[in-house]
Amino acid sequence: MYQTALKKTPLGETGLEITRVGFGAWAIGGGDWEFGWGPQDDEESIAAIHRGLEQGINWIDTAAAYGFGRSEQMVGRALQGVVERPYVFTKCSLLPGPGRIVEHSLKRDSVLREASASLERLGVDAIDLYQIHWPIPVEDIEEGWAALAELKEQGLVRHIGVSNFDVDQLRQVQQIAPVETLQPQYSLIERDIEQELLPFALEQRIGVIVYSPMGSGMLTGKMTRARIEQMSDSDWRKRDARFQEPRLSKNLDLVDRLTAVAERHDTIPGAVAVAWALRHQAVDAAIVGFRRPDQVDPILPAAGLELTDEDLIEIEGSAR
């Protein structure tokens, strides 16, 4: 029903041709930090990456913050000996604080240190896309962005972008150096960026890769109240409003609609959720988190799934 080769698309004006689904490495950072996903087996992480590459995914998105280095280490291990290396995207600005709580820094020296440590963990000569993870502290975003521009000039990173920035912040840092890419959260349950951010990115020809298109697992079709109750205390989602009432019931109703559409297309609800995010003309690609190799294959059809008007009406019935 679907083509075997994953669809590719230009990422903004970077010159990179990326698959419309990328490997998200947040969860493989494990649970031993503030925004961890619970226990994670490193060998399963590496096997998941290898399966993604075998199936044609040509980019991986990680961050120094994910497990405070653990995710990057797993990516680096997985890429050892790989002949056709995928593009590697990572991020800076979140540092380990006391009790494995996140601290923010966009100071130049901190950014340069983070880049050096990421290069070492990843085992690459240059990072294909380096991104500011969060625009915090706001008073330092110009200093942080100038540091990324400096790293690009040095050849240590090939392209630079930002994550979680708003339009005003994009305009602010564009005075220093062009913003090549933007990484916002986007899903059926997080649609705020449709109003200003995506139109601005489209107008400015900024490449857009969205994260959490399945709502951090909520829209996979496998999330239930019982599963949420059984989540590890080290899984950040247990404390997230999307996984609690009153939003939980609304989100599970949305999953029922996704399931009905998925059955028509002989696929799974998560793939439909990803395809929904990819349908926006400003979105180049979506980051999908995989923790085990068996999770990879069912989602990949989303890269080529064309949703009909009927599908969209059913899905979006009361999505807002």
Image (tube, rainbow, N blue to C red):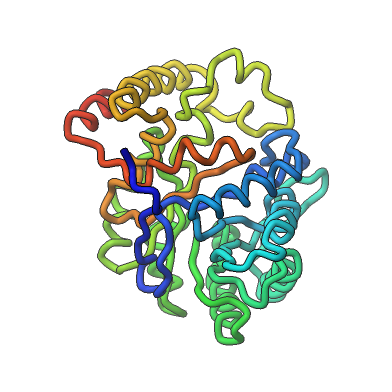
Residue 112 placement: quadrant: bottom right
Which image quarter holds the N terminus?
A: top left
Residue farthest right in this picture: 98
Q: Position of residue 118 (x, y in %)?
A: 70, 66
**Which residue is found at the position 74% from the left and 45% from the top?**
101
Of residue 231 and residue 221, the one placed in the foreground of this image is 221
Of residue 121 and residue 254, the one placed in the foreground of this image is 121
Residue farthest left in this picture: 309
**Which residue is found at the position 44% from the left and 50% from the top?**
21
* Vertical relation: 274 (above or below) 50: above
**Which residue is found at the position 40% from the left and 28% from the top?**
269
* Vertical relation: 141 (above or below) 126: above
Image position of 112 (left or right of 215): right
**Which residue is found at the position 48% from the left and 47% from the top?**
211
Residue farthest bottom in this picture: 154
* Vertical relation: 294 (above or below) 128: above
Which image quarter holds the C terminus?
A: top left
Q: Position of residue 279 (x, y in %)?
A: 28, 46
Q: Position of residue 5 (x, y in %)?
A: 39, 53
Q: Position of residue 285 (x, y in %)?
A: 40, 54
* Vertical relation: 298 (above or below) 7: above
Number of numbered discs visible in the structure rendering = 0
